[in-house]
Amino acid sequence: MAAFISDGREGLGRNATEAGSEAGAVMADRPGLMSYYSAMSEALGPMHWWPARTPFEVIVGAILTQSAAWSNVERAIANLRAARMLTPAAIARVPATRLAAIVRPSGYFRQKARKLKAFVRFLQDEYGGSLKRMFSTPTGELREKLLSVHGIGPETADSILLYAGNHPVFVVDAYTHRILSRHGLATGKSGYEEVRALFEDSLPSDARLFNEFHALIVNTGKNWCRKREPRCTECPLSSLLPPESSLLRLPVAAGKQNRGANLTT
Ligand code: SF4
């Protein structure tokens, strides 16, 4: 961890305007993204993401967590483990209706069963069922292929690439958009690819850094940067809010202090 923090600090002087992104123009006079990383890392410590035993389990979790609370995904994964179905071959064999019943706790279970089956079919057709072969594909090429699979959008593809395959891509989620927007680093109109480019062009291309940075953002979003009633005065990122931000003047909610647990999406 120390190695990439040291490398990452070199990126502090290279703001996103130099990276050439449209969002970068918004953040020209703002602290660099590594300041955000450092503030959250110092306050919260290591996140130990992604909570899974194997790369395939990460992929299953990345698909099941779409529009679902992680606690419900954990129940679905526990069901799959109990049924000995956390392998591509087992998912390929099981009838779709049975698979849907097993992943039911994650919600949208019929669609998610179809998505899991689409992924293992893709894995078999393109890579003979081998995740090792799949992840040895160059990052950009594999990203394009994953995005062509039914049910895999940018956030899911990037979660698979980063957390299962150790490819240096930045995962952007709703918390990322919200925090950047509230800090004046992006606008409400910034799209997924624009925000991803902001991180990837401004930071060292380091999978460990991207892994930890995204996990810290999710933790901060869950614990402080809520949609309603953000808890800015207690938040690890409060010192990085623009001085003119009205959020700094929000009252502290009584009895809501929280140092942040290692939560997952
Ligand atoms: S809660 Fe406030 S200080 Fe924390 S990330 Fe959100 S906007 Fe920033």
Image (tube, grey):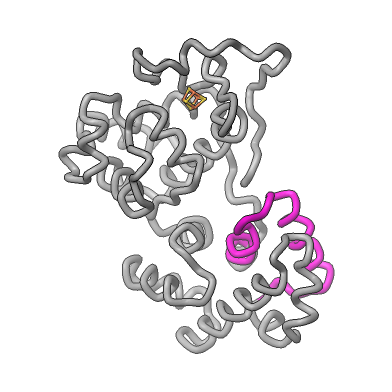
Residue shown at 46% from the left, 37% from the top: 178
- Give coordinates of residue 124: x percent, y percent: 54, 86
Location of residue 184 (image quadrant): top left
Residue 226 relative to residue 134: left or right: right
Residue 173 relative to residue 77: left or right: left
Residue 196 relative to residue 110: left or right: left
Q: How many marks?
A: 0
- Give coordinates of residue 261: x percent, y percent: 66, 31
Residue in the foreground of this view, choosing between 36 and 9: 36
Our reading of the magenta stretch's main secondary structure is helix
Residue 137 vs 202, above or below: the answer is below
- Give coordinates of residue 249: x percent, y percent: 48, 10
Location of residue 11 (image quadrant): top left
- Give coordinates of residue 218: x percent, y percent: 55, 39
Q: Residue furthest right?
A: 82
Location of residue 188 (image quadrant): top left
Residue shown at 81% from the left, 73% from the top: 101
Q: Quadrant of the N terminus?
A: top left
Magenta residue span:
58-87
Residue 210 relative to residue 185: left or right: right
Residue in the foreground of this view, choosing between 246 and 185: 246
Residue shown at 43% from the left, 16% from the top: 246
Residue shown at 57% from the left, 80% from the top: 118
